[in-house]
Image (tube, helix red, strand yellow):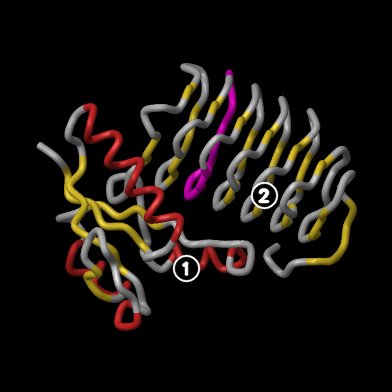
Amino acid sequence: MADDLILFPFGGNSREAAVAVEALNAVAPRYRILGFLDDNHAALRSSSYPLLGGSELWASYRGKARLLAVPGSPTSFRSRASVIGRFQLDASQSVTIVDPSVRFAASAALGFNTVVMAGCFVSAQARLGDHCVILPNTVVSHDAKLGDHVLVGSNVSISGGVEIGENCYVGSGARLKEGVRVGRGALIGIGAVVIRDVPAGAVVAGVPARVIGESDAC
């Protein structure tokens, strides 16, 4: 029997997550998507699943449905932990979604309320934390470790042994050299090539990546 599932918020991450859920269901029915929660629901329009209402409605669904909360963008990733934290989720109330096209090593592991989208490769002994989003066609190589609340864009290459701290954002097309450490709350810009450690809270961009500012996410 398929579990009822709600997505939060109504945005790019959740709509792409819905595609991954649909792909899983095409293999074997697992989740019935009830719709989206979004605090700006009155101003939005959905052509796929219903907009159920604001995040406060989760209280009425708790225990009856599961929630996949995937907020965040380059401009709002700093608040991901606090926004998701409002739902007080645990593993029994959420889901972990891995698109069936993903190559996921048997020795790799990932947390709850995490989604790995189409075309990704998660290699040997890689570790993904809770509340992570990995967008399509990204490679997470052997022994890489991603902390909680990390959001990784599409077509990113995370080399072996890389460590990414909690609440970071890695922009699409970025490349991270083997063994690099990225401090908590850092932002890596689109297409950046990271060849040295990134301090906590830093904003880096360029080829090779250089610190160009600071975030307030740490």
Q: Main secondary structure of the magenta part?
A: loop
Q: Which residues are magenta?
A: 124-135
Find numbered disc 1 in the image and state the secondary structure of the residue it sits on.
helix
41 and 89: which is toward the camera? 41
- Quadrant that contains the N terminus: top left
- Picture residue at 30% right of the left edge, 76% below the top: 54
Q: Is residue 3 left or right of residue 115?
A: left
Q: Amino acid at mark 2?
A: Val
Instruction: Measuring from the top left, give residue 18's x and y in whole percent.
Output: 32, 49
Mark nearer the viewer, 2 or 1? 2
Q: Nearer the viewer, residue 135 or 55?
A: 135
The image quadrant of residue 63 is bottom left
Look at 68% across and 65% down and name the residue there.
217
Residue 155: x percent and y percent? 62, 39
Q: CA distance from mark 2 to mark 1?
A: 19 Å
Residue ID for mark 2: 170
Q: Quadrant of the C terminus?
A: bottom right
Q: Which residue is mark 1?
A: 83
Q: Is residue 164 left or right of residue 197?
A: left
Label 2 packing within 10 angstroms: few (<14), some (14-19), many (20+): many
How far from the left and from the top, in percent, is residue 119? Answer: 49, 31
**Residue sitting at x 43%, y 43%:** 115
Residue 142: give x, y in percent of width and height.
65, 22
Residue 118 placement: quadrant: top left
Asked whether, in this view, residue 145 is left or right of residue 12, the answer is right
Residue 181 quadrant: top right
Residue 112 on the magenta segment: no
Query: Is 99 or 128 nearer to us in this picture?
Result: 99
Q: Amino acid at mark 1?
A: Val
Which of pointers 2 and 1 lies earlier in the amino acid sequence?
1
